Amino acid sequence: MNQLDSEQKLAQRVTLVGAVWDFLLGMAKIAAGYLSQSQALIADGVHSLSDLVTDVFVYIAAANARQEPDENHPYGHLRFETITTVVLGLILVVVAAGIAFESITGDNQPVTTWYGITAVLLTIGIKEAIFHYTKRAGEQIGSKMLIANAWHSRSDALSSVAVLAGLIGVYFGYTWADMVASVLVALLIGKIAVEMIWENVSELVDTAPDPKLIEQIKATTGQLKNVAAPHDIRARSMAGKIYLDMHIHVPARASVSEGHYFSDLAVYTIKKNHPQVQDVMVHVDTDDHLQTESFIKKDGKPPVLNLPDRDQVLADLGFMLKDHRAYLDLPATSLHYINQSLNISLVALADLAPHQDFSKLTTAIKMDLERLPYGKDHEILWRF
């Protein structure tokens, strides 16, 4: 079983446990509220049942969001979680508005009963336990949707505290306390809903994650040997997972494979130290000056692209070095684009060189290289 599958099963199991308790507590509070004529208790029961509705959404989203990436969703399906959380928030806004309206316009005469008090106390204890259970699971798999659902459960516990205060007020003759408690429940639900919507809409438009996290990631990468100055970092969130694009600076004469090694090292280190990072795309800079966006001209063309490419360089070398072509391994030539200049490392085959006078041959080849209209500090490497 891969990680996404195990995360999906955990999210579904936690949600099912919460759903069962939401149903039982919701029905118990509505029945107790009806018998007690307590609008606040009925509202609190509706709140619990609204948790049940959101549990259904969360369960469905959990079944889809943790699927592996496919051809149509190369970044995976985690946005299903984000969209679901926004929908949950909108549902809660409607629920909050309905509770507030019913509380203000209703004409019930609440009474305090032992079963009403019992239902509220049970809700406070059980929903607080569900909050910790769900939040711990959400943090374990990095699911903002589960964490949001956990806080939804805690809102039920907190609103029940308000209802309890209202029932106590009614017991002492303050009938208006029930209405005040209902309005407080509605405001609490509405506040949580608006925060939930705002946070997840921000994620849908690729708002950058917490800047502190980005600084921590930069510090983690900057501690690696031969990997310096992580910069031009772009990041976005998907259901609590972070997707990164970043540049790193490696030794200027590192080979392509060595640069890839440094890239893999950076990705591994970041994901190991920051589990919320799901994917990292690394761009390797091999220039002595960082190739940031400030080095790109207004036409969008980096200055280094004004230098010739490999095919052109090899063609020029073949023409300029035709007298020495027989003992040169041109395909093994290394090109180093450093400081907006081109350095060429030629490989010469010692066993094919005439007269074996490597000093004179090296001088002759370098003189031919100086005729090139680009580059400097070229070198000849003899392979024995």
Image: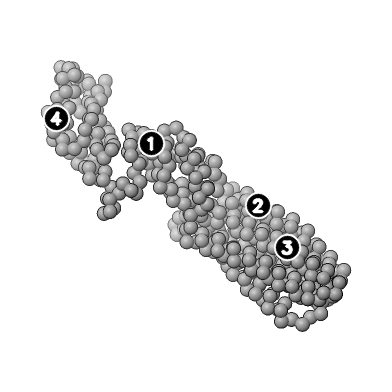
- Answer above or below: position of 85 versus 354: below
Amino acid on which disc 2 is placed: Ala
Could you give the CA–CA distance between mark 3 and mark 4, rounded to whole angstroms?
83 Å
The residue shown at (15%, 17%) is 355
Residue lying at 46% horizontally and 51% vertically, measured from the top left? 235
Amino acid type at circle 3 is Leu
Do tag 2 and tag 4 residues touch (Cβ < 8 Å)? Answer: no
Query: Is 250 located above or below residue 237 in the figure?
Result: above
Q: Earlier in the sequence, mark 1 or mark 3?
A: 3
In the image as oriented, which residue stretches furthest toward the left? 323
Label 2, label 4: how far apart the Cα atoms are = 68 Å
Q: Which of the image's four quarters has the C terminus?
A: top left
Residue 346 showing in the rendered view: no
The residue that label 3 is drawn on is: 158
* Residue corresponding to mark 4: 368
* Mark 4 surroundings within 10 Å by alpha-carbon count, few (fewer than 14), some (14 through 19), many (20 or more): some
Secondary structure of the residue carrying numbered label 4: helix
| In this rendering, the label closer to the viewer, 1 or 3 | 3
Q: Which residue is mark 2?
A: 137
Tally the marks: 4
Q: Secondary structure at mark 3?
A: helix
Q: Which residue is mark 1?
A: 250
